[in-house]
Image (cartoon, rainbow, N blue to C red):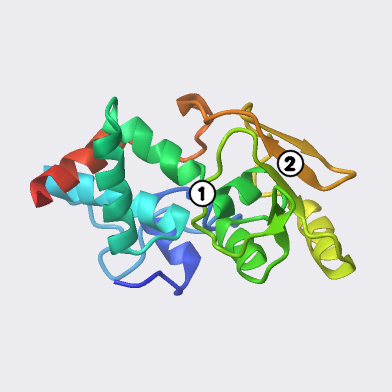
């Protein structure tokens, strides 16, 4: 299953607030579709699936990519759910978004893919690049890149830069000081349900 490119607010109505996917808030508070307002008793599996879908849509991943991250988190030891969230948060596209250089993760991914972002002085165009403590992330040193980032910064997706990052708005340069802590993850999610969902899959 490839990455979702359809209407974003439709997904937000179904799954709840996804700060990485869209800055807009839907006018209707109930899920889309003919039976959106019907009250249904959801199974345990349906709840797990919904939490998994939140992760997928918020971070803009395909099913295969997310499964790969889950397996990587399992191998890392410790809390699989927390490690999974940290791996996703430390992706370059998400880090650019959390620094305020783009209003959403899809916009940040486009910045990265089009070569507007440099890491440690070198242009990196791979959105899934895993940022590490000590990495310096900046707008590429050319007028078009700086102008694009400055325009994005007028409409930031989230108000605060998390504590593991720092950002110099004048130089358009950010630094990764550590790994994100759980309380700074903006997405409201129960990561244990995601781990349980994939444990069923084997």
Q: Residue at x 48, y 65 (%)?
A: 8
Vertical position of residue 164 compared to residue 168: above or below: above
Q: In this view, does 102 lie to the left or right of 42?
A: right
Identify the residue under disc 1. Answer: 91
Q: Which of these two is toward me, 64 or 161?
A: 64
Residue 153 position within the rendered picture, expressed as x and y whole percent measured from the top left: 78, 52
Q: Disc count in the image?
A: 2
Quadrant housing the N terminus:
bottom left
Q: Which of these two is toward me, 159 or 63?
A: 63
Residue 86 appears in the rendering:
yes
Disc 2 crowd rating (10 Å Cα; few below 14, some 14-19, many 20+) is many
Name which quarter of the figure residue 64 lies in: bottom left
Residue 197 position within the rendered picture, expressed as x and y whole percent measured from the top left: 17, 45
Vertical position of residue 115 compared to residue 52: above or below: below
Q: Earlier in the sequence, mark 1 or mark 2?
A: 1
Residue 105 position within the rendered picture, expressed as x and y whole percent measured from the top left: 56, 56
Identify the residue under disc 2. Answer: 174
Q: Which of these two is toward me, 103 or 125?
A: 125
User: Helix, strand or loop at disc 1?
Assistant: loop
Residue 141 position within the rendered picture, expressed as x and y whole percent measured from the top left: 84, 60
Residue 12 disc label: none
């Amino acid at each position: 299953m490839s990455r979702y490119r359809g209407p974003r607010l439709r997904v937000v109505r179904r799954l709840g607030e996804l700060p990485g996917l869209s800055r807009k808030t839907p006018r209707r508070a109930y899920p889309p579709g003919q039976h959106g307002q019907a009250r249904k008793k959801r199974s345990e599996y349906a709840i797990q699936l919904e939490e998994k879908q939140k992760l997928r849509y918020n971070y803009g991943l395909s099913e295969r990519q997310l499964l790969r991250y889950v397996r990587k988190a399992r191998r890392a030891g410790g809390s699989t759910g927390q490690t999974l969230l940290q791996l996703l948060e430390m992706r370059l596209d998400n880090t650019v978004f959390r620094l305020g250089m783009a209003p959403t993760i899809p916009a940040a991914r486009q910045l990265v893919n089009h070569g507007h972002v440099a890491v440690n002085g070198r242009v990196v165009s791979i959105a899934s690049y895993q940022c590490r403590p000590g990495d310096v992330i900046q707008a590429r040193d050319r007028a078009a890149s700086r102008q694009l980032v400055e325009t994005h910064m007028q409409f930031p997706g989230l108000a605060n830069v998390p504590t593991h990052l720092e950002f110099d708005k004048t130089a358009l340069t950010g630094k990764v000081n550590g790994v994100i802590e759980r309380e700074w993850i903006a997405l409201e999610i129960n990561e244990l349900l995601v781990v349980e969902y994939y444990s069923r899959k084997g």
